Amino acid sequence: MSTPVIRVENLGKRYRVGQRERYFALRDVISRVFTAPFRRQKRDYLWALSDVSFDVSQGSVVGLIGRNGSGKTTLLKLLSRITRPTAGFAEIHGRVGSLLEVGTGFHPELTGRENIYLSGAVLGMKKSEINRRFDEIVAFSEVERFLDTALKHFSTGMQMRLAFAVAAHLEPEILLVDEVLAVGDLDFQKKCLGKMEEVSSSGRTILFVSHQMNQIRRLCKRAIWLDGGSMQQDGSAKEIVNAYEAKALKTNREELERMPGSITFGSWYIRESRSNRLDLETQSGRLTVRFEAFAKQDIRKGMLVIILRSSENVVLWSGMYADLQIRPGPWKFDLAFESLPLNPGIYSWETRFYDGHAWLEHLQSPELSIVSETDADIFSYLKGSLNLAVDFDLLDQTDCEVERL
Protein backbone atom coordinates (compact mmCIF):
# COMPACT_ATOMS: atom_id res chain seq x y z
CA MET A 1 0.00 0.00 0.00
CA SER A 2 1.43 3.37 -1.01
CA THR A 3 2.19 6.09 1.53
CA PRO A 4 -0.62 8.69 1.67
CA VAL A 5 0.24 12.15 0.35
CA ILE A 6 -2.07 13.71 2.96
CA ARG A 7 -2.29 12.36 6.48
CA VAL A 8 -4.56 14.03 9.03
CA GLU A 9 -4.70 12.79 12.61
CA ASN A 10 -6.90 14.17 15.42
CA LEU A 11 -6.77 17.60 13.80
CA GLY A 12 -8.50 20.43 15.64
CA LYS A 13 -8.70 24.21 15.47
CA ARG A 14 -10.04 26.41 18.27
CA TYR A 15 -10.90 30.09 17.99
CA ARG A 16 -11.66 32.58 20.73
CA VAL A 17 -15.12 34.09 20.41
CA GLY A 18 -15.49 37.75 21.38
CA GLN A 19 -15.15 41.35 20.34
CA ARG A 20 -11.99 43.32 20.02
CA GLU A 21 -11.01 45.25 23.10
CA ARG A 22 -11.43 49.00 23.14
CA TYR A 23 -8.49 51.41 23.09
CA PHE A 24 -6.73 51.76 26.44
CA ALA A 25 -4.63 54.71 27.61
CA LEU A 26 -1.30 54.17 29.37
CA ARG A 27 -2.90 54.65 32.82
CA ASP A 28 -5.41 51.92 32.01
CA VAL A 29 -2.67 49.50 31.00
CA ILE A 30 -0.71 50.15 34.22
CA SER A 31 -3.88 49.72 36.28
CA ARG A 32 -4.68 46.38 34.60
CA VAL A 33 -1.16 45.06 35.29
CA PHE A 34 -1.61 45.50 39.04
CA THR A 35 -5.20 44.28 39.19
CA ALA A 36 -4.82 41.30 36.81
CA PRO A 37 -3.90 38.73 39.52
CA PHE A 38 -7.16 39.49 41.32
CA ARG A 39 -9.44 39.47 38.25
CA ARG A 40 -10.74 36.47 36.38
CA GLN A 41 -12.04 36.90 32.85
CA LYS A 42 -14.39 34.37 31.31
CA ARG A 43 -13.38 33.41 27.78
CA ASP A 44 -15.58 31.79 25.17
CA TYR A 45 -14.01 29.40 22.65
CA LEU A 46 -15.29 27.72 19.50
CA TRP A 47 -13.90 24.53 18.03
CA ALA A 48 -14.19 25.12 14.28
CA LEU A 49 -12.63 21.68 13.70
CA SER A 50 -12.41 18.84 16.21
CA ASP A 51 -10.71 15.42 16.17
CA VAL A 52 -10.62 14.97 12.37
CA SER A 53 -8.58 12.07 10.97
CA PHE A 54 -8.22 10.69 7.44
CA ASP A 55 -5.65 9.74 4.78
CA VAL A 56 -5.62 10.63 1.09
CA SER A 57 -3.62 8.60 -1.42
CA GLN A 58 -1.91 10.01 -4.48
CA GLY A 59 -4.19 10.70 -7.45
CA SER A 60 -7.38 10.73 -5.36
CA VAL A 61 -10.11 13.31 -5.87
CA VAL A 62 -11.89 13.85 -2.55
CA GLY A 63 -14.94 16.06 -2.07
CA LEU A 64 -15.56 17.90 1.20
CA ILE A 65 -19.24 18.56 1.86
CA GLY A 66 -21.27 20.01 4.71
CA ARG A 67 -23.32 23.02 5.71
CA ASN A 68 -21.84 26.51 6.10
CA GLY A 69 -19.74 26.62 9.26
CA SER A 70 -19.09 22.87 9.31
CA GLY A 71 -15.29 23.32 9.13
CA LYS A 72 -14.51 22.69 5.45
CA THR A 73 -12.64 25.96 4.81
CA THR A 74 -10.85 25.71 8.17
CA LEU A 75 -9.59 22.26 7.18
CA LEU A 76 -8.21 23.53 3.86
CA LYS A 77 -6.53 26.48 5.62
CA LEU A 78 -4.81 24.07 8.00
CA LEU A 79 -3.64 21.89 5.13
CA SER A 80 -2.43 24.99 3.26
CA ARG A 81 -0.43 26.11 6.33
CA ILE A 82 -2.33 29.41 6.39
CA THR A 83 -3.21 28.79 10.03
CA ARG A 84 -1.82 26.49 12.71
CA PRO A 85 -3.80 23.67 14.35
CA THR A 86 -4.75 23.78 18.02
CA ALA A 87 -4.61 19.99 18.28
CA GLY A 88 -3.39 17.09 16.18
CA PHE A 89 -1.34 17.36 13.01
CA ALA A 90 -1.47 17.16 9.22
CA GLU A 91 1.31 15.80 7.01
CA ILE A 92 1.54 16.89 3.39
CA HIS A 93 3.91 15.17 0.96
CA GLY A 94 4.16 17.20 -2.22
CA ARG A 95 3.87 20.71 -3.64
CA VAL A 96 0.54 22.27 -2.68
CA GLY A 97 -1.53 24.69 -4.75
CA SER A 98 -4.40 26.36 -2.90
CA LEU A 99 -7.46 28.10 -4.27
CA LEU A 100 -9.34 29.34 -1.23
CA GLU A 101 -10.94 32.78 -0.91
CA VAL A 102 -10.77 34.84 -4.09
CA GLY A 103 -7.46 36.69 -4.19
CA THR A 104 -5.67 34.50 -1.63
CA GLY A 105 -1.95 34.42 -2.44
CA PHE A 106 -2.16 37.39 -4.81
CA HIS A 107 -0.83 40.90 -4.19
CA PRO A 108 -3.39 43.59 -5.06
CA GLU A 109 -0.75 46.16 -6.07
CA LEU A 110 0.95 43.83 -8.56
CA THR A 111 -0.33 43.27 -12.08
CA GLY A 112 -1.92 40.05 -13.26
CA ARG A 113 1.31 39.15 -15.05
CA GLU A 114 3.42 39.75 -11.95
CA ASN A 115 1.06 37.74 -9.77
CA ILE A 116 1.41 34.73 -12.09
CA TYR A 117 5.18 34.76 -11.56
CA LEU A 118 4.77 35.43 -7.82
CA SER A 119 2.47 32.42 -7.42
CA GLY A 120 4.87 30.22 -9.37
CA ALA A 121 7.79 31.34 -7.19
CA VAL A 122 5.79 30.55 -4.02
CA LEU A 123 5.23 27.03 -5.39
CA GLY A 124 9.00 26.71 -5.84
CA MET A 125 8.94 26.77 -9.65
CA LYS A 126 11.73 28.16 -11.80
CA LYS A 127 11.08 31.09 -14.11
CA SER A 128 11.62 28.86 -17.14
CA GLU A 129 8.85 26.52 -15.89
CA ILE A 130 6.45 29.44 -15.44
CA ASN A 131 7.34 30.79 -18.90
CA ARG A 132 6.48 27.41 -20.40
CA ARG A 133 2.95 27.48 -18.96
CA PHE A 134 2.37 31.25 -19.13
CA ASP A 135 0.42 31.37 -22.41
CA GLU A 136 -1.84 28.49 -21.31
CA ILE A 137 -2.64 30.29 -18.04
CA VAL A 138 -3.52 33.54 -19.80
CA ALA A 139 -5.64 31.79 -22.45
CA PHE A 140 -7.56 29.80 -19.84
CA SER A 141 -8.23 32.80 -17.59
CA GLU A 142 -9.47 34.96 -20.49
CA VAL A 143 -8.02 38.15 -18.92
CA GLU A 144 -5.29 38.85 -21.48
CA ARG A 145 -6.55 42.38 -22.10
CA PHE A 146 -6.05 43.30 -18.43
CA LEU A 147 -2.86 41.33 -17.80
CA ASP A 148 -0.75 44.43 -17.08
CA THR A 149 -3.39 46.05 -14.85
CA ALA A 150 -3.03 46.04 -11.05
CA LEU A 151 -4.99 43.19 -9.52
CA LYS A 152 -6.92 45.57 -7.25
CA HIS A 153 -8.72 46.84 -10.35
CA PHE A 154 -9.85 43.32 -11.35
CA SER A 155 -13.46 42.32 -10.70
CA THR A 156 -14.08 39.41 -8.34
CA GLY A 157 -14.83 37.15 -11.30
CA MET A 158 -11.62 38.14 -13.09
CA GLN A 159 -9.56 37.47 -9.96
CA MET A 160 -11.17 34.05 -9.62
CA ARG A 161 -10.49 33.21 -13.26
CA LEU A 162 -6.81 34.10 -12.93
CA ALA A 163 -6.44 32.36 -9.55
CA PHE A 164 -7.91 29.10 -10.84
CA ALA A 165 -5.84 29.22 -14.04
CA VAL A 166 -2.63 29.71 -12.03
CA ALA A 167 -3.46 27.02 -9.46
CA ALA A 168 -4.39 24.43 -12.11
CA HIS A 169 -1.61 25.08 -14.63
CA LEU A 170 1.46 25.52 -12.42
CA GLU A 171 1.44 21.77 -11.79
CA PRO A 172 1.07 21.43 -7.99
CA GLU A 173 1.11 17.82 -6.85
CA ILE A 174 -1.80 18.54 -4.47
CA LEU A 175 -4.60 20.98 -5.35
CA LEU A 176 -6.89 22.37 -2.63
CA VAL A 177 -10.00 24.04 -4.07
CA ASP A 178 -12.60 25.84 -1.95
CA GLU A 179 -16.09 27.00 -2.97
CA VAL A 180 -14.80 29.62 -5.41
CA LEU A 181 -16.35 28.36 -8.65
CA ALA A 182 -19.68 29.81 -7.52
CA VAL A 183 -18.27 33.26 -8.35
CA GLY A 184 -17.83 32.46 -12.03
CA ASP A 185 -20.41 32.15 -14.79
CA LEU A 186 -21.82 28.79 -15.84
CA ASP A 187 -19.55 28.36 -18.88
CA PHE A 188 -16.42 29.04 -16.83
CA GLN A 189 -17.58 26.65 -14.09
CA LYS A 190 -17.87 23.88 -16.68
CA LYS A 191 -14.45 24.83 -18.02
CA CYS A 192 -12.94 24.62 -14.52
CA LEU A 193 -14.53 21.24 -13.81
CA GLY A 194 -13.16 19.92 -17.08
CA LYS A 195 -9.69 21.16 -16.12
CA MET A 196 -9.89 19.50 -12.70
CA GLU A 197 -10.85 16.22 -14.38
CA GLU A 198 -7.77 16.61 -16.55
CA VAL A 199 -5.60 17.36 -13.50
CA SER A 200 -6.92 14.32 -11.62
CA SER A 201 -6.35 12.02 -14.61
CA SER A 202 -2.67 13.06 -14.60
CA GLY A 203 -2.19 11.50 -11.16
CA ARG A 204 -2.37 14.62 -9.02
CA THR A 205 -4.41 14.84 -5.83
CA ILE A 206 -7.43 17.15 -5.36
CA LEU A 207 -9.41 18.13 -2.27
CA PHE A 208 -12.53 19.90 -3.48
CA VAL A 209 -15.09 21.84 -1.41
CA SER A 210 -18.46 22.51 -3.01
CA HIS A 211 -22.11 22.99 -2.10
CA GLN A 212 -23.08 21.81 -5.60
CA MET A 213 -23.68 18.09 -5.19
CA ASN A 214 -23.70 17.51 -8.95
CA GLN A 215 -20.10 18.78 -9.06
CA ILE A 216 -19.10 16.39 -6.25
CA ARG A 217 -20.77 13.46 -8.04
CA ARG A 218 -19.11 14.31 -11.35
CA LEU A 219 -15.59 14.92 -10.06
CA CYS A 220 -15.09 12.82 -6.92
CA LYS A 221 -15.06 9.11 -6.16
CA ARG A 222 -14.74 9.75 -2.42
CA ALA A 223 -16.39 12.32 -0.15
CA ILE A 224 -15.95 13.45 3.46
CA TRP A 225 -18.98 14.93 5.21
CA LEU A 226 -18.20 17.47 7.96
CA ASP A 227 -20.84 18.61 10.42
CA GLY A 228 -20.24 21.00 13.31
CA GLY A 229 -16.47 20.70 12.92
CA SER A 230 -16.47 16.90 13.17
CA MET A 231 -16.42 14.13 10.61
CA GLN A 232 -19.93 12.77 9.99
CA GLN A 233 -19.13 10.21 7.27
CA ASP A 234 -16.29 9.21 4.95
CA GLY A 235 -16.73 6.93 1.96
CA SER A 236 -18.00 6.61 -1.61
CA ALA A 237 -19.03 9.99 -3.04
CA LYS A 238 -22.37 8.65 -4.27
CA GLU A 239 -23.27 7.12 -0.89
CA ILE A 240 -22.13 10.12 1.16
CA VAL A 241 -23.91 12.65 -1.08
CA ASN A 242 -27.12 10.59 -0.99
CA ALA A 243 -26.95 10.45 2.83
CA TYR A 244 -26.25 14.18 3.04
CA GLU A 245 -29.18 15.02 0.77
CA ALA A 246 -31.47 12.60 2.59
CA LYS A 247 -30.83 14.52 5.81
CA ALA A 248 -31.61 17.79 4.02
CA LEU A 249 -34.99 16.34 3.04
CA LYS A 250 -36.07 16.22 6.68
CA THR A 251 -37.03 19.87 7.00
CA ASN A 252 -38.22 20.84 10.46
CA ARG A 253 -41.74 22.25 10.65
CA GLU A 254 -40.66 24.92 13.15
CA GLU A 255 -37.99 26.11 10.69
CA LEU A 256 -40.64 26.47 7.99
CA GLU A 257 -42.82 28.56 10.30
CA ARG A 258 -39.95 30.95 11.01
CA MET A 259 -39.15 31.54 7.33
CA PRO A 260 -40.46 34.76 5.71
CA GLY A 261 -43.38 34.83 3.27
CA SER A 262 -46.94 33.53 3.30
CA ILE A 263 -45.82 30.17 1.84
CA THR A 264 -42.62 28.33 2.67
CA PHE A 265 -41.54 25.19 0.80
CA GLY A 266 -39.83 22.39 2.68
CA SER A 267 -38.76 18.98 1.42
CA TRP A 268 -39.63 16.92 -1.66
CA TYR A 269 -39.17 13.27 -2.46
CA ILE A 270 -40.10 10.55 -4.94
CA ARG A 271 -42.86 8.59 -3.20
CA GLU A 272 -41.90 5.24 -4.74
CA SER A 273 -38.30 5.41 -3.45
CA ARG A 274 -38.82 7.82 -0.51
CA SER A 275 -35.73 9.72 -1.65
CA ASN A 276 -34.46 12.22 -4.21
CA ARG A 277 -32.81 9.40 -6.19
CA LEU A 278 -34.35 7.68 -9.21
CA ASP A 279 -32.70 4.42 -10.31
CA LEU A 280 -33.61 3.62 -13.91
CA GLU A 281 -32.74 -0.05 -13.35
CA THR A 282 -35.43 -0.56 -10.71
CA GLN A 283 -37.98 2.16 -11.46
CA SER A 284 -40.18 2.12 -14.53
CA GLY A 285 -43.57 3.50 -15.41
CA ARG A 286 -45.63 5.88 -13.32
CA LEU A 287 -43.98 7.79 -10.47
CA THR A 288 -45.10 10.50 -8.05
CA VAL A 289 -43.08 13.43 -6.73
CA ARG A 290 -44.38 14.83 -3.43
CA PHE A 291 -43.69 18.38 -2.23
CA GLU A 292 -44.24 19.64 1.31
CA ALA A 293 -44.89 23.25 2.32
CA PHE A 294 -46.34 25.42 5.09
CA ALA A 295 -48.93 28.19 4.73
CA LYS A 296 -48.95 31.00 7.29
CA GLN A 297 -52.23 32.52 6.18
CA ASP A 298 -55.42 31.73 4.31
CA ILE A 299 -54.93 31.86 0.53
CA ARG A 300 -58.02 31.94 -1.68
CA LYS A 301 -56.66 32.14 -5.22
CA GLY A 302 -53.06 31.04 -5.22
CA MET A 303 -51.02 30.18 -8.31
CA LEU A 304 -48.29 27.52 -8.29
CA VAL A 305 -45.60 27.08 -10.95
CA ILE A 306 -43.29 24.03 -10.90
CA ILE A 307 -40.16 23.98 -13.08
CA LEU A 308 -37.77 21.11 -13.79
CA ARG A 309 -34.29 22.22 -14.91
CA SER A 310 -31.21 20.42 -16.21
CA SER A 311 -27.75 20.82 -14.64
CA GLU A 312 -27.13 23.49 -17.31
CA ASN A 313 -30.19 25.39 -15.99
CA VAL A 314 -32.24 24.64 -19.10
CA VAL A 315 -36.01 24.38 -18.50
CA LEU A 316 -37.09 20.81 -19.37
CA TRP A 317 -40.66 20.94 -18.10
CA SER A 318 -43.00 23.30 -16.28
CA GLY A 319 -46.55 23.21 -14.99
CA MET A 320 -48.88 25.96 -13.76
CA TYR A 321 -51.83 25.44 -11.41
CA ALA A 322 -54.21 28.31 -10.58
CA ASP A 323 -57.12 29.10 -8.23
CA LEU A 324 -55.62 27.15 -5.33
CA GLN A 325 -57.39 27.46 -1.98
CA ILE A 326 -55.05 26.75 0.92
CA ARG A 327 -55.74 26.94 4.65
CA PRO A 328 -53.05 27.95 7.19
CA GLY A 329 -50.80 25.08 8.26
CA PRO A 330 -48.86 22.26 6.57
CA TRP A 331 -49.89 21.12 3.10
CA LYS A 332 -48.65 18.78 0.40
CA PHE A 333 -49.07 18.35 -3.32
CA ASP A 334 -48.15 15.55 -5.73
CA LEU A 335 -46.92 15.56 -9.31
CA ALA A 336 -47.78 12.22 -10.91
CA PHE A 337 -45.83 11.39 -14.09
CA GLU A 338 -46.61 8.47 -16.38
CA SER A 339 -42.87 8.37 -16.93
CA LEU A 340 -39.86 10.64 -16.53
CA PRO A 341 -37.87 10.09 -19.75
CA LEU A 342 -34.57 11.62 -18.61
CA ASN A 343 -31.02 10.39 -19.01
CA PRO A 344 -28.87 9.78 -15.91
CA GLY A 345 -27.73 13.06 -14.46
CA ILE A 346 -28.50 15.81 -11.97
CA TYR A 347 -31.66 17.91 -12.22
CA SER A 348 -33.34 20.52 -10.03
CA TRP A 349 -36.87 21.57 -9.09
CA GLU A 350 -37.95 25.19 -8.80
CA THR A 351 -41.22 26.32 -7.22
CA ARG A 352 -42.90 29.70 -7.70
CA PHE A 353 -46.05 30.67 -5.84
CA TYR A 354 -48.29 33.72 -6.20
CA ASP A 355 -50.32 34.38 -3.03
CA GLY A 356 -52.38 37.24 -4.47
CA HIS A 357 -49.86 39.93 -3.56
CA ALA A 358 -46.36 38.78 -4.55
CA TRP A 359 -44.43 35.98 -6.25
CA LEU A 360 -42.39 33.75 -3.92
CA GLU A 361 -39.56 31.78 -5.53
CA HIS A 362 -37.70 28.82 -4.06
CA LEU A 363 -35.10 26.39 -5.43
CA GLN A 364 -35.98 22.97 -4.06
CA SER A 365 -33.06 21.25 -2.32
CA PRO A 366 -31.64 18.66 -2.73
CA GLU A 367 -31.27 18.01 -6.44
CA LEU A 368 -32.95 15.21 -8.36
CA SER A 369 -30.42 12.43 -9.02
CA ILE A 370 -31.17 9.98 -11.84
CA VAL A 371 -28.79 7.02 -12.00
CA SER A 372 -28.26 3.85 -14.03
CA GLU A 373 -25.57 1.24 -13.45
CA THR A 374 -25.64 0.14 -17.10
CA ASP A 375 -25.30 3.66 -18.46
CA ALA A 376 -22.19 3.86 -20.66
CA ASP A 377 -19.86 6.85 -20.53
CA ILE A 378 -19.07 6.81 -24.26
CA PHE A 379 -20.31 9.90 -26.08
CA SER A 380 -21.85 11.16 -22.79
CA TYR A 381 -21.45 14.75 -23.95
CA LEU A 382 -23.87 13.99 -26.82
CA LYS A 383 -26.62 12.39 -24.74
CA GLY A 384 -28.61 15.45 -23.79
CA SER A 385 -31.35 15.22 -21.15
CA LEU A 386 -34.15 13.24 -22.81
CA ASN A 387 -34.26 9.46 -22.71
CA LEU A 388 -36.96 8.86 -25.31
CA ALA A 389 -38.06 5.39 -26.34
CA VAL A 390 -37.24 5.12 -30.05
CA ASP A 391 -37.43 2.13 -32.42
CA PHE A 392 -34.54 2.05 -34.89
CA ASP A 393 -34.96 -0.04 -38.04
CA LEU A 394 -32.23 -0.53 -40.64
CA LEU A 395 -34.04 -1.06 -43.93
CA ASP A 396 -32.98 -3.53 -46.57
CA GLN A 397 -31.14 -1.61 -49.25
CA THR A 398 -33.13 -3.42 -51.94
CA ASP A 399 -36.18 -1.53 -50.66
CA CYS A 400 -34.51 1.83 -51.20
CA GLU A 401 -35.16 3.62 -54.46
CA VAL A 402 -32.04 5.41 -55.62
CA GLU A 403 -32.30 8.03 -58.27
CA ARG A 404 -29.48 7.70 -60.71
CA LEU A 405 -28.21 10.82 -62.43
Image (cartoon, grey):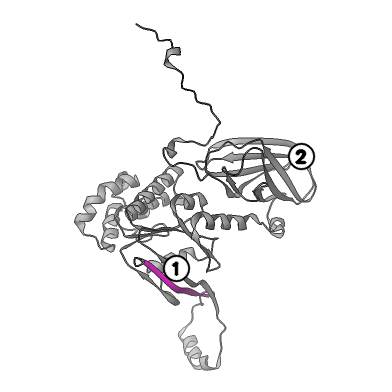
Q: Residue at coordinates 27% horizontally, 52% vertically from top-left?
A: 113
Q: Is residue 258 above or below residue 88?
A: above
Amino acid type at mark 1: Phe
Q: Residue 119's x, y, as percent?
A: 30, 59
Q: Can residue 96 be seen in this view?
A: yes
Q: Give the class, few, some or many, for how many residues have Cα within 10 Å of label 2's Cα (few <14, many ≥20).
A: some
Q: Quadrant of residue 2?
A: bottom left
Do callouts 1 and 2 mark residues in contact (Cβ within 8 Å)? no
Q: Which mark is residue 324?
A: 2
Left or right: 186 with respect to 280?
Answer: left
Q: In which quarter of the image is residue 96?
A: bottom left
Q: Residue 289's x, y, as percent?
A: 66, 44
- Closest to the camera, between mark 1 and mark 2, is 1
Q: In this view, does 168 lie above or below 404?
A: below
Q: Residue 390's x, y, as percent?
A: 54, 28
Q: Quadrant of the C terminus?
A: top left
Q: Give the class, few, some or many, for how many residues have Cα within 10 Å of label 1's Cα (few <14, many ≥20).
A: some
Amino acid type at mark 2: Leu
Q: Is residue 82 visible?
A: no
Q: From mark 1 to mark 2, how far is it between C-alphas?
A: 52 Å
Q: Quadrant of the N terminus?
A: bottom left
Left or right: 98 with respect to 399?
Answer: left
Residue wearing tag 1: 54
Q: Give the range drawn in magenta.
A: 5-22
Q: Quadrant of residue 87?
A: bottom left
In the picture as drawn, the residue positioned furthest to the left comes out as: 128
Q: In this view, does 157 lie above or below 23?
A: above
Q: Magenta span: helix, strand or loop, mainly?
A: strand
Q: Which numbered disc, 1 or 2, marks the residue that appears first in the sequence? A: 1
Left or right: 328 with respect to 363?
Answer: right
Tell which of 24 and 6 is nearer to you. Answer: 6
Q: Residue 269's x, y, as percent?
A: 65, 49
